[in-house]
């Protein structure tokens, strides 16, 4: 489900892949969105809805699509769970990130996008920066939740910071999968 480019550290992508796979296995959401962002992003993006009056940031209680500029999105993939088999199938979906004025994002509540979905963002450029970030939003029966984690390579990848998920829970997610990981796709054409 995760796409790796030449700019992405394979160890960080492996960590993100394991966490995504474990989250999908744990929640069995009807839809999964996987978004590759061009560079590291900070914890401030969790729950960030947009700006008003030019510079005043808004973090709403209801989760909205984080207002990443479309030019920061390297790829977006969408998967739907087949009701009969339980397998996830790649399907088309509208782009989550729109080219619009920031305040227009304030009403893009994720509950309007799906009744059952995981939204997973992971950072790119980790080869050069030695930093990585992961963010997950979840919607199920109108209930939403989200968390954020950041990593740093020094020299191995270490969990640096979490928000709304404990370090122990995140480390458990990274190790939970007892099935082989799907190979990550290499994309150097991005």
Image: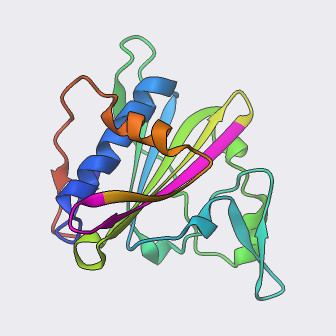
Judge left or right: residue 53 versus residue 177.
right
The one nearer the camera, 84 or 109, is 109
Q: Position of residue 139 (x, y in %)?
A: 64, 36
Q: Residue at x 47, y 46 (%)?
A: 33
Q: Decide: is 2 above or below 75.
A: above
Q: Position of residue 143 (x, y in %)?
A: 73, 34
Q: Residue at x 43, y 31 (%)?
A: 24
Instruction: Determine the residue located farthest toward the top in the rendered image.
Output: 84
Q: Residue at x 41, y 11 (%)?
A: 84
Q: Is residue 152 magenta?
A: yes
| Prevalent SS, magenta region | strand
Instruction: Determine the residue located farthest toward the right in the rendered image.
Output: 53
Q: Is residue 148 magenta?
A: yes
The one nearer the camera, 82 or 182, is 182
Using the rendered view, name the quadrant where residue 38 is placed.
Answer: bottom left
Query: Which quadrant is the C terminus positioned in?
Result: bottom left
The one nearer the camera, 78 or 121, is 121
Instruction: Determine the residue located farthest toward the bottom in the rendered image.
Output: 54
Q: Position of residue 79 (x, y in %)?
A: 41, 37
Highlighted magenta segment, given as a residue range: 144-157
Judge left or right: residue 133 versus residue 13.
right
The one nearer the camera, 56 or 131, is 131
Judge left or right: residue 120 versus residue 181.
right
Q: Decide: is 97 above or below 89.
A: below
Query: Which quadrant is the N terminus positioned in?
Result: top left
């Amino acid at each position: 489900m995760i796409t790796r480019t030449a700019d992405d550290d394979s160890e960080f992508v492996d960590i993100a892949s394991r966490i995504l796979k474990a989250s999908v296995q744990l929640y069995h959401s009807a839809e999964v969105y996987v978004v590759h962002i061009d560079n590291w992003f900070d914890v401030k993006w969790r729950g960030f809805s947009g700006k008003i009056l030019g510079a005043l940031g808004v973090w709403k209680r209801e989760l909205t699509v984080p207002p990443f500029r479309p030019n920061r999105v390297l790829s977006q993939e969408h998967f739907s769970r087949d009701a009969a088999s339980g397998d996830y199938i790649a399907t088309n979906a509208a782009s989550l990130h729109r080219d619009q004025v920031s305040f227009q994002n304030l009403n893009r509540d994720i509950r309007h996008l799906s009744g059952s979905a995981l939204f997973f963002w992971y950072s790119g450029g980790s080869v050069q920066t030695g930093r990585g970030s992961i963010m997950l939003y979840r919607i199920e029966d109108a209930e939403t939740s989200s968390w954020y984690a950041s990593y740093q390579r020094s020299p191995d990848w270490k969990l640096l910071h979490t928000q709304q998920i404990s370090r122990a829970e995140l480390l458990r997610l990274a190790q939970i999968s007892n099935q082989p990981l799907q190979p990550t796709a290499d994309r150097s054409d991005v």
